[in-house]
Image (cartoon, rainbow, N blue to C red):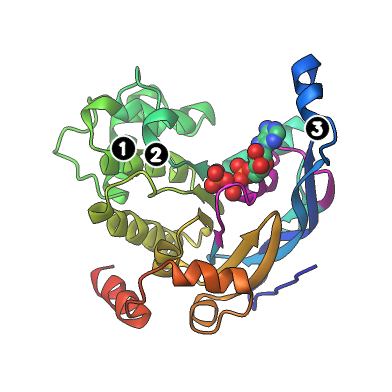
Amino acid sequence: MTIATTTSTPLLEVDDLCKSYAPKRGLIGSILARGSKPSNTLKNISFDLGKGEILGVVGESGSGKSTLGFTILGLIEASSGSVRFAGKSLPRDARELRTFRRSAQMIFQDPYQSLNPRFRIKDIVTEPLLVYGLIGNGEVTAAAEEVLDLVGLRPGKSYLERFPHELSGGQRQRVSIARAVVLKPKLLIADEPVSMLDVSIRAGILRLLRSLSASMEMSVVYISHDLSTVRYICDRVAVMYRGEIVEIGSTDQIIAYPVHPYTKRLLSAVPRISFAEKRQRVAQHA
Ligand SMILES: Nc1ncnc2c1ncn2[C@@H]1O[C@H](COP(=O)(O)OP(=O)(O)OP(=O)(O)O)[C@@H](O)[C@H]1O
């Protein structure tokens, strides 16, 4: 079991979390599953996440990163272990669950699939406010302008009335970030948010996530298979391999002094450009 503690009061405490998916059902599923071991997708995962902290979860495809994200949010039930959010176990009661959902949001790799294509941008980004009864219909335009401005989609550029297919990939991801942060969550799970975007616009989205995290004191679990983006924004990094956290530590430490052979392998796949230089560049543009 790997435990890492942070200096600030943790927002999230993940303790000994395990997840095995049920074997496939039906005749073909059971034939295919014959002789195979139950899948241990998450094995004894433990870590804390401080308020406003950004933790990178990095590992190859199938290592369990998305399962971890879904389990933290209670969208997938853990097989054992616990997740505590703001000092409390994940709620089961419908009313508490509604409050929790407001505080913990998720964004995904493909902003196009996660946005309703039939909704205008102003309705996409303000729907959570309407659902929670925080604004009335007459306030939709003003609220949409405010949150779009927050994510760098300046008012006056008529984003409000457009549909998702009329925007670029980067603009769409900004819209999905706007929708996720409009309720001012304490936690954001960002599952590969830049991996489908053009390399030239990735840094802008990462800078945006970092500045929102700082200004809103929002903790972020940033999931990626790519250490070169993780090191742009994360305070700490957890390296996942086959369902386990094999190494966790500050980003600088993991990159400069990797201990686990798998981390070394991941790092050798990344061009050895100056990490300090990149961080400095990001800070200059933030
Ligand atoms: N609903 C499910 N039922 C059964 N097995 C699943 C399910 N979801 C994921 N898995 C399996 O769990 C393992 C981990 O998947 P997961 O998507 O969490 O990994 P990942 O690291 O996020 O991968 P990727 O980067 O490709 O998304 C994989 O072997 C996957 O096939």
Dividing the picture into quadrants, the one containing residue 148 is top left
Q: Indicate whether 214 appears above or below 138.
A: below
Q: For the residue marked with disc 1, what is the amino acid?
A: Arg
Reading the image, the residue beneath label 2 is 176
Of discs 3 and 2, which sits in the foreground? 3
Q: Indicate whether 250 appears above or below 138.
A: below
How many residues crowd mark 1 within 10 Å: few (<14), some (14–19), many (20+)? Answer: many
The structure residue drawn at horizontal position 30% and vertical position 60%, both measured from the top left corner, is: 203
Q: Position of residue 201 (x, y in %)?
A: 25, 53
Mark 3 to mark 2 CA distance (whole Å) = 31 Å
The structure residue drawn at horizontal position 31% and vertical position 29%, both measured from the top left corner, is: 122
- Could you tell which of marks 3 and 2 lies nearer the N-terminus? 3
Q: Position of residue 217 (x, y in %)?
A: 50, 62
Is 143 colored magenta in this rendering? no
Query: Observer-nearest residue: 3 or 130?
Result: 3
Q: Is mark 2 within 8 Å of ligand 1?
A: no
Q: For the residue marked with disc 2, what is the amino acid?
A: Ser
Number of numbered tags placed on the structure image: 3
Q: Are marks 2 and 1 in contact (CB under 8 Å)?
A: yes
Q: Is residue 98 visible?
A: no
Query: Observer-nearest residue: 275 or 35?
Result: 35
Q: Secondary structure at mark 2?
A: helix
Reading the image, the residue beneath label 1 is 172
Q: Quadrant of the N terminus?
A: bottom right
Q: Is mark 3 within 8 Å of ligand 1?
A: yes
Left or right position of 273 against 221: left
Of discs 3 and 1, which sits in the foreground? 3
Q: Secondary structure at mark 3?
A: loop
Span colored in magenta: 57-81
Q: Quadrant of the C terminus?
A: bottom left
The structure residue drawn at horizontal position 74% and vertical position 51%, both measured from the top left corner, is: 42
Reading the image, the residue beneath label 3 is 22
